[in-house]
Amino acid sequence: MKIIITESQYRMLENYTQEDEVTKKLLFNIWQNELDSDGEIDFDTKIANYINYKPIGRVHEFYRDFLGGWDNMVEKSYELMDRTFDTMDYDFRGGYNFKFKPQFHSDYEEDNLIFVNGPIESDGKVTLIMTDGETHYLKDLEENEDLWWEIDSEIRGVIEDILYQEVTKKTGIMVETNLCWIKE
């Protein structure tokens, strides 16, 4: 009998150690005690430091296993992202005020990661604290190539911070922004 596995699964089996199994059991016990009445828990990467376990990617993997496995958590991630997010709902927006709804494709799934695109609503704004202190529409700044590369990077950072809070902490699935643009 032959068993066919992916390259990713092979690497996982190859690198799995006894220490991993002990760590996994320890983390499962910790997380079991932290579940709230709804069966929800928020992931905190500091747990790896607390138990002095270095491969943080493996901790995300254990967390997903604890919550029901990769497939279930990818599905839950998509459900959690199937809405419009508003930066005004968060404290860490850094002068940005915009709404976005992630676009995702199963083609963009990788080991511990889902890639999404982040189209921004056309009425999005930013206050340029380090330059003129004025508030500008993002669509107006998109034409300024000297400034847009930095704004684009910061927008992606804000989107990823929001999705970390709303998705990664609840599923163990990391989400990165592939592209973002201002919708017409």
Image (tube, rainbow, N blue to C red):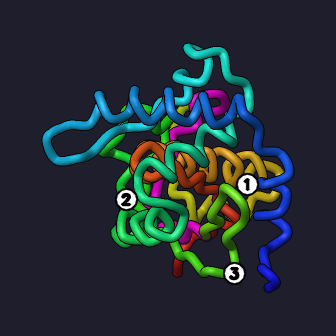
Disc 3 to disc 1, how far (Cα)?
A: 27 Å
Disc 2 or 3, which lies upstream in sequence? 2
Numbered badge on residue 148: 1
Element on which disc 2 rests:
strand
Disc 1 to disc 2, how far (Cα)?
A: 22 Å
Residue picked out by circle 3:
107
Segment colored magenta: 117-132
Element on which disc 1 rests:
helix
For disc 1, the neighbor class at 10 Å (few under 14, some 14 to 19, many from 20) is some
Q: Quadrant of residue 34?
A: top left
Viewer-side residue, 143 vs 114? 114
Q: Which residue is drawn at 76% across and 64% down?
A: 9
Q: What residue type is labelled 1?
A: Trp
Residue picked out by circle 2:
85
Element on which disc 3 rests:
strand
Q: Which amino acid does label 3 sit on?
A: Asp
Residue 29, horizontal then vertical, whole percent:
40, 30
Q: Residue at x 68, y 35 (%)?
A: 20
119 part of magenta stretch:
yes
138 part of magenta stretch:
no
Q: In which quarter of the image is residue 158?
A: top right
Residue 105 visible from this viewpoint: yes
Disc 3 or 1, which lies upstream in sequence? 3
For disc 2, the neighbor class at 10 Å (few under 14, some 14 to 19, many from 20) is some
